[in-house]
Amino acid sequence: MNAVFTGIFLASLVALTVVAPQNVLPALLGGAEKSLKMAVTLFCIYAVWMGISRLAEKSGLSRAAARGLKPLTRRLFKTENEAANENIAMNLSCNLLGIGGAATPYAVKAISELEKENNGFAQKLLFIINATSVQVVPSTVIAMRAAAGSAAAADIFLPSLICTTFSTLFAVGVYLLGCRIWR
Amino acid sequence: MALVVPVIFIAVFLFAAVKKVKIYDEFSAGVKEAVKFTLSVIPCLAAIFMMCELFEASGLADRLTEAFSPLFAFWGIPKELTKLVLIKPFSGSGSLAYLNNIIENYGADSYVARCACVCYGSSETVFYISAVYFASLKQKKLFAPIAIAVISAFLTTVLACLLCKIM
């Protein structure tokens, strides 16, 4: 990210200085202002969803979901490590609920558990599932559309569900197939 | 479809009430986490948004869009989405910036904005995630999983643009 940021920032800075140097500072200030507006929008979204997800967590709903997923994770990830299974299941259920931010810490824990048994297969599989996003409720975008005055903010629910299902199934399928062929 | 979110909220609240969770306390505790989280992303957001503004103002963004849009157009991806699709694998805040731009410029219910929302909602920051997840690993050989994730993200974008046309 550092290289990408530096590259784009510097290239744009130089290009803009050549074309219109008086626009450099206004662009930077404008960007900073937009970032605060975005932060306010984001806060509203997180406040709602993190409030709800905290309730789901404290009432044991998240745990219950994780327990339901466990037989599946044990098979799919080929691991008997209890802590790893638990963390994977929590990661998946957070993802399903669309709270990606909450999912990451569980994934990182699961990855380090899997490292103990040298299970590279499961680590990569977990990465692929997370990197292709498994989200049932795209909460952030629905909220952003609602904030922008959409008439039916949730009407992207179905296409999103189809897309996210496709992306995960496709990637996992290719990966599993690849593992069979190259082994 | 409008029912999905309210029904989830009602279910969670009822379940929490049955389990005798102190709903007000815990809900506010969740919001407190949201405050912390928002404060923690502001520095990144500010830096990225400044970069995006410069990138736009310098005209480089338009060049990039022009360079990639024939390729994207071939796959049915509207040219307005080019920047969003290109930045998404690297940065969540960056793609959020462009998503926000698209929604503001074209209206939340336009085809382009709906498309952008579906693309954003059904893909992830592949390179960022790979950095976070694999930071602690000794054995690498990560090219294949990352390549699979990137290809799948691209195909999903194509599918999203198709679906938004008919749904």
Image (cartoon, coloured by chain):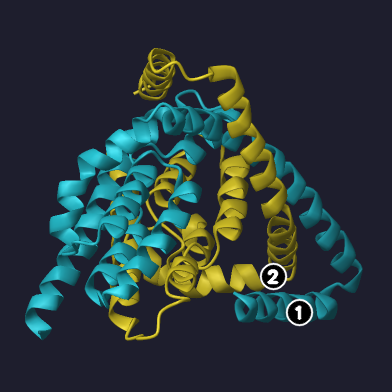
Please tell me in which quadrant of the rendered image residue B105 appears. Answer: top right
Color used for chain B?
Answer: yellow
- Asked if residue B162 shows in the view, the reply is no
* Drawn side of residue B75 relative to residue A40, left or right: left
Q: Quadrant of the N terminus of chain A?
A: bottom right
Are both tags, 1 and 2, on one chain?
no
Image position, residue B142 (x, y; %): 34, 81
Color used for chain A?
Answer: cyan
* Mark linked to residue A15: 1
* Drawn side of residue A8 relative to residue A145, left or right: right
Residues A176 and A63: in front is: A63
Dot 1: element: helix
Q: Amino acid at mark 1?
A: Ala
Q: Quadrant of the C terminus of chain A?
A: bottom left
Image position, residue A17 (x, y; %): 84, 78
* Drawn side of residue B153 relative to residue B59, left or right: left
Circle 2 packing at 10 Å, graded few (<14), some (14-19), many (20+), is: some
Q: Amino acid at mark 2?
A: Gly
Name the residue located 61 percent from the left edge and 22 percent from the top edge: B25
* Drawn side of residue B113 relative to residue A155, left or right: right
Residues B107 and B150: in front is: B150
- Asked if residue A109 shows in the view, the reply is yes
* Mark linked to residue B59: 2
| Vertical relation: A133 (above or below) A181 | above
Name the residue located 46 percent from the left edge and 62 percent from the top edge: B125
Number of marks drawn? 2
Contact between labelled residues 2 and 1, with CB atoms less than 8 Å apart: yes
Letter of the chain that mark 1 sits on in the rendering: A
Image position, residue A130 (x, y; %): 35, 58
Image position, residue A81 (x, y; %): 24, 62
